[in-house]
Amino acid sequence: EPGLYIVATPIGNLGDVTKRAVDILSACDLIACEDTRVTGKLLNLIGVKKPMRRYDDHASEEARERLLAEMGEKAVVLVSDAGTPLISDPGYRLVRSARERGIAVTSLPGPSALVVALTLAGLPTDRFLFAGFLPAKDKARGDALIELAAMPFTLVFYETGPRLVDSLQAMARIMPGREIAVARELTKLHEECRTGTADDLAAHYTAHPPKGEIVLLAGPPPAAEAPGEADVDAALRAALETMS
Ligand code: SAM
């Protein structure tokens, strides 16, 4: 069927490629990707040979229009280098334009580092805020953290090794007392998830500079924690007393 297919791919472990992903990659007419070398490797591993074309949201208007025009008669797949497209990855503009033109858009779910990290860290998951990458510059990073510090949610960031310690130190300063988690190399051989205070983790990663890909999480501010069972019981008793 012609249209746009958003396809999630593994974030490190090839075993996580879904059957639907293999099926659509095998059946499609064209694969739009961030980097034809990276996607070429994945296609090799699953034994698929298809035309690929580089696409990102900074592509020229003409390049996007050409791709959209082709969706009229071709099945076009969008993948990113790893994980779910559009999640800190290109695709948003393409999906938006496709929808505006009435092109069929389908999304095939699969791995995303943000979800893997959340399910691993042991922090509250009922309400969370995914904030992508923090700004690289100190002032902008601090401002971003100040804006987020008051929100009663678990915060999730994508992070890089060289910037991790700076971010942890900024968190120690701006949102002290929160439970922090660093999830690294998810689904890979050296997967690690370390929890503690921002200060302790900053000290650890100063001594052991982190390699590989990282998700950084902060639990909600202490006051925002969901009421425990004891609190609910106490509130109920108090309410009953006022009624009698
Ligand atoms: N679209 C991807 C997804 O759904 O997870 C994310 C793309 S973003 C450009 C890349 C960032 O995702 C990395 O810098 C890192 O923060 C995170 N990431 C990707 N794979 C990861 C992994 N295996 N372990 C930890 N973090 C990962």
Image: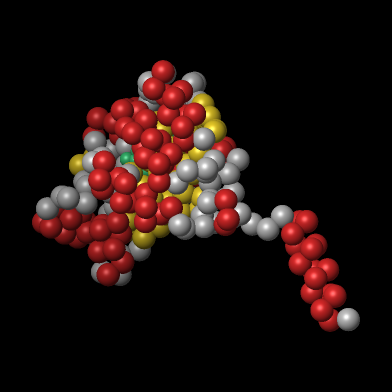
- Horizontal side, residue 99 vs residue 68: left or right: right
Quadrant of res 25? top left
Q: Residue at x 17, y 50 (%)?
A: 58
Quadrant (top left/top right/bottom left/bottom right) for the C terminus: bottom right
Give percent across and percent down for residue 233: 80, 62
Relative to residue 80, is residue 97 depicted above or below?
Answer: below
Q: In what quadrant does ligand 1 lie?
A: top left
Give percent across and percent down for residue 235: 76, 67
Q: How is the image coloured?
A: secondary structure
Q: Residue at x 51, y 35 (%)?
A: 197
Give percent across and percent down for residue 234: 79, 63
Q: Residue furthest right?
A: 244
Q: Residue at x 56, y 38 (%)?
A: 121
Give percent across and percent down for residue 202: 42, 29
- Horizontal side, residue 210 vs residue 56: left or right: right
Relative to residue 129, is residue 37 depicted above or below?
Answer: above
Front position in the image: 226 or 78: 226
